[in-house]
């Protein structure tokens, strides 16, 4: 069909001009992006990306300088990453503070990114990026920006979850932060119904065997909880759905139908790597370590570096960017 031919030619020319890689980095879901994504169903190409989770940006304890140092370390990596993937808890804190403070932090986050990196940034939302759910904030549901509205408005997101492609690999940034449903619980982790419908539909559009990487804040599968003896009571391990998602079994069943290579998470500020039923689950250490007070359970301030390969495998290492806490 002439139209298809001309589109192919256009995309070929765009690729030759380096525009394809730039379009791959887009996070919106315009029809142009969808066309490029569909055409991007070619053999996966090698590239590097970094996973920066639990930044918890604040001025206190020089957290702003720490985040700047992390971005400078990213810029100095060789080879240079194609993009930055964040894992949520971008700021400290929007959950339990007044509106002005939360807004200031989201603006600071964007300013530091703008001043210190030219790489595309794909963001994931964390529990600390939700405004006002904790009653300490004093916010009411009727307040402007309440809940996820503030992060969406200030960061100019159309939604709190999205998908994008890069060099034949397909990425999903999921929002697993849901409001608490019992007394004293501020949030808990799972993918809600409308987002699951979107997720299933997007997965179904992918070419067979396309390598998939999923990023979310609260881990779906993690061994980190076994470091907490207090969770073993009355002959049972009790892992809260605030620390590990409650819909893990359902999503494991879904992932069996696809080539999910890697599931990334943060939230715990510790590190593990679990191979289970196909995917590799990596819980990465925090950019802020222990909320800018030093290493957390021995895990230094750092970020993940991932080298994706054409055969759908990847190499991973954790990069300690040398931050020393000012406490
Ligand atoms: Fe965190």
Image (cartoon, rainbow, N blue to C red):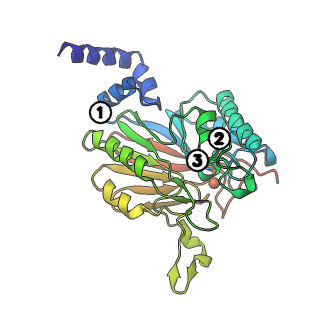
Query: Farthest residue toward the right?
Result: 327
The location of residue 10, given as percent across then percent down, is 32, 14
Asked whether the beta carbons under mark 3 and mark 2 sit within 8 Å of each other, the answer is no
- Give left or right: position of 238 versus 4: right
Q: Which residue is mark 2?
A: 145
Report the disc number at residue 153.
none
Q: Earlier in the sequence, mark 2 or mark 1?
A: 1
Query: Farthest residue toward the bottom?
Result: 234
Q: Which residue is mark 1?
A: 41
| Position of the C terminus by quadrant | bottom right
Task: Name the mark nearer the viewer: 3 or 2.
Answer: 2
Element at badge 1?
Answer: loop
Could you tell me how far apart the alpha carbons at marks 2 and 1 are, in whole angstroms?
A: 38 Å
Residue at 63%, 40% in the rendered image: 150
Element at badge 2?
Answer: loop
Q: Is mark 3 within 8 Å of ligand 1?
A: yes
The location of residue 283, given as percent across then percent down, is 52, 56
Badge 2: how crowded within 10 Å, few (<14), some, or many (20+)?
many
Badge 3: how crowded within 10 Å, few (<14), some, or many (20+)?
many
Q: Which residue is mark 3?
A: 88
The location of residue 47, given as percent across then percent down, is 43, 36
**Above/below status of 179 relative to 84:** below
Q: Nearer the viewer, residue 82 or 240?
A: 240
Query: Farthest residue toward the left?
Result: 1
**Above/below status of 254 relative to 303:** below
Q: Is mark 2 within 8 Å of ligand 1?
A: no
Q: Earlier in the sequence, mark 3 or mark 2?
A: 3
């Amino acid at each position: 069909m002439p139209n298809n031919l001309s589109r192919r030619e256009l995309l070929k020319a765009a690729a030759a001009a380096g525009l394809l890689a730039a379009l791959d980095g887009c996070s919106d879901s315009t029809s142009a992006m969808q066309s490029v994504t569909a055409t991007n169903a070619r053999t996966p190409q090698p590239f590097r990306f970094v996973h920066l989770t639990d930044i918890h940006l604040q001025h206190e304890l020089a957290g702003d300088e720490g985040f700047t140092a992390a971005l400078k370390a990213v810029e100095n990596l060789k080879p240079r990453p194609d993009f930055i993937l964040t894992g949520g808890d971008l700021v400290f804190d929007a959950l339990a503070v007044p509106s002005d403070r939360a807004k200031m932090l989201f603006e600071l986050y964007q300013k530091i990114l703008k001043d210190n990196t030219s790489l595309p940034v794909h963001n994931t939302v964390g529990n600390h990026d939700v405004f006002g759910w904790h009653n300490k904030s004093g916010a009411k549901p009727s307040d402007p920006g309440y809940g996820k509205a503030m992060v969406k408005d200030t960061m100019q997101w159309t939604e709190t979850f999205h998908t994008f492609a890069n060099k034949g690999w397909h990425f999903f940034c999921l929002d697993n932060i849901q409001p608490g449903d019992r007394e004293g619980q501020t949030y808990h982790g799972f993918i809600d119904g409308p987002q699951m419908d979107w997720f299933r539909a997007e997965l179904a559009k992918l070419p067979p065997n396309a390598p998939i990487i999923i990023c979310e804040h609260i881990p779906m599968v993690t061994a980190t909880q076994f470091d907490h003896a207090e969770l073993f009571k009355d002959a049972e391990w009790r892992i809260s759905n605030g620390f590990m998602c409650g819909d893990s079994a359902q999503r494991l069943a879904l992932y069996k139908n696809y080539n999910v290579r890697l599931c990334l998470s943060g939230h715990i500020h510790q590190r593990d790597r679990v191979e289970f039923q196909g995917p590799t689950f990596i819980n990465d250490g925090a950019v802020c370590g222990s909320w800018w007070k030093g290493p957390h359970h021995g895990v230094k301030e750092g970020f993940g570096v991932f080298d994706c390969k054409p055969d759908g495998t990847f190499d991973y290492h954790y990069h300690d960017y040398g931050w020393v806490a000012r406490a």
